[in-house]
Amino acid sequence: MGWTAEQKQQSRKKIIDSAAELFTKDGFDKVAINDVMKHAGLTRGAFYNHFESKSDLYAEAILSAAHLAKSHTIERAGFQLSDIIETYLSDKHRNGEFCCPLAFLTTDIHQRDDQVRTTYTRVLKGFINNIHELNVGQPALDESEAIKKAVLMIGGVAIARAVNEDDFAEQLLSACREGVNKGG
């Protein structure tokens, strides 16, 4: 007896969600297909029923991780840009309470194929657009200002994750919050 379409879709979602979690925490090279499938509670053979390659899964995982990060910041922080900035540039984010692929995978993406880089670019443009749209009640942001805010937020988290001194990491995040709130 074969799997139903719903069961196949549920398996695919498990694989993508597991990959999103593992890739954002450990990067592409440190995560094997076996790791993803074990985390998803499925066999390795099931992987090839859903994806052509690890790179194909990585692109899907970036979209999934971005969606989860967006729902975490917008749904929990609210629709005020200042609250989103505080949540995004927080120690909780730095420590992986939610893992935005823009910040968590930034040093990895340039080594990947065009499919993955295209997905990352699409997610980045969406992030910039969200910043532009959520600047409600504030002076209008032009695209350049939205880009500056996005880059300061993403870079701030990425660099704060890279250092091994918590106090210094908080200084970095604080400086970035200040910079983004002042207009970058």
Image (cartoon, rainbow, N blue to C red):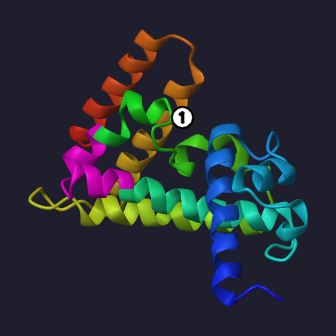
Above or below, 2 against 52 in this view is below
Instruction: Residue 54 in the image: state x and y as whole percent.
Output: 83, 61
Q: Residue at x 84, y 77 (%)?
A: 49
Residue 109 to residue 129: above or below: above
Q: Position of residue 153 (x, y in %)?
A: 40, 41
Residue nearer the viewer, 47 or 152: 47
Q: Quadrant of residue 15?
A: bottom right
Side (left or right) of 172 relative to 83: right
Q: Is residue 156 visible?
A: no
In the image, residue 66 lies at what x, y percent? 51, 58
Asked if residue 63 lies left or right of residue 45, the reply is left
Quadrant where the image shows the N terminus: bottom right
Going by the image, does 58 lie left or right of 68? Answer: right
Q: Secondary structure at mark 1?
A: helix
What segment is highlighted magenta in the picture?
A: 72-86
Apparent side of residue 149 relative to residue 103 in the rendered image (left or right): left
Residue sitting at 72 percent across and 42 percent down? 27
The quadrant of the rendering that contains the C terminus is: top left
In percent of the image, x 63 and y 39: which residue is there?
25
| Residue most extreme to the front | 1
**Which residue is at 66% across, 54% downward?**
18
Instruction: Name the kind of residue labelled 1 in the image.
Output: Ala
Foreground pick, 59 / 6: 6
Q: Which residue is mark 1?
A: 158
Q: Is residue 85 visible?
A: yes
Q: Residue furthest left?
A: 137
Report if residue 76 lies within the magenta region. Answer: yes
Assess whether residue 97 is covered by the magenta stretch.
no
Is the residue marked by circle 1 packed among few (<14), some (14-19), or many (20+) residues within 10 Å? many
